[in-house]
Amino acid sequence: MIGLGVLLFLCIWGAVALLIANLIGKKLLKIYTKDAEGKTTSKGVLIILVVSVLVFFAPIADEIISYLAYSKMCQDAGKYEFAPNMDEKKVFGREYRIEEEDKKLIRLFPTFQTLHPEDNSNFGVVIETTKLKLIDDNTNETLLTTRTAKPLRSFFAMPWDGKRIPWLLHECSDVLGKNGGGSQKYIRSLQMRLKYHLN
């Protein structure tokens, strides 16, 4: 049902973008889109289509611009590092809990900067990075560490369940195995068992 709603919205916005582009072509760019008789030329049709594409993607332009920087951060998200004096043999088969620390808010666009944790402004593309520690539930030893990265908001993010979900950027780590990704498969290969996750 949600998917149909999003699809319907995109279709309506596509029609609106085409209408806006057509008006721009006729009013502002008519010297480029019309011939001497006032008819739209093939070049004019191409210009209107290009403008309509630009209008269609304009609301998520901040996410498009931020995509490369976010992708670079995602390359390390969810990758595990052994704690000092730990290796595969020492962590094998352990029961663990996950604890979070060093949570940061980072704005990727329009400027790259670290924000105050209480900053709730909707200006720009903001992501959250968190360091996770996998701790032995019996001995309290730190076994592995990793980082997560997830987008929190963008200028035209979709409001959903009290949050603002970006259209293009999505959580790129799989520490808890939500997406069946490689990081959780690695933990399973070590036969480690999650007890609980402390936020």
Image (cartoon, helix red, strand yellow):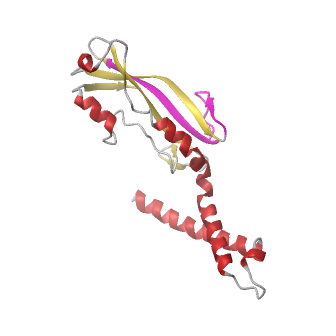
Q: Position of residue 18 (x, y in %)?
A: 61, 70
Could you say which quadrant of the image residue 96 lies in?
top left
The quarter of the rendered structure image containing the C terminus is top left
Visible residue check, residue 177? no
Answer with the quarter of the image where residue 33 lies.
bottom right
Instruction: Please state the horizontal and vertical placement of residue 140, each as a whole percent of the image.
Output: 32, 12
Q: Which residues are magenta?
A: 111-135
Taking the spot 78% from the left edge, 86% from the top edge, the residue there is 36
Q: Is residue 91 above or below residue 32?
A: above
Outermost residue to the bottom = 37
Pick the front one: 27 or 153: 27
Location of residue 142 with respect to 172 vertically, above or below: above
Q: Is residue 1 left or right of residue 48?
A: left
Q: Is residue 100 magenta?
A: no
8 and 32: which one is in front? 32
Q: Is residue 115 magenta?
A: yes
- Where is residue 123? Give x, y as percent: 65, 41
Who's the residue at 57% across and 65% down the image?
13
Q: Is residue 148 visible?
A: yes
Q: Residue at x 64, y 77 (%)?
A: 45
Image location (x, y in percent) of residue 79: 39, 30
Quadrant into which the N terminus falls:
bottom left
- State left or right for residue 46 relative to residue 143: right
Residue 99 left/right relative to 46: left
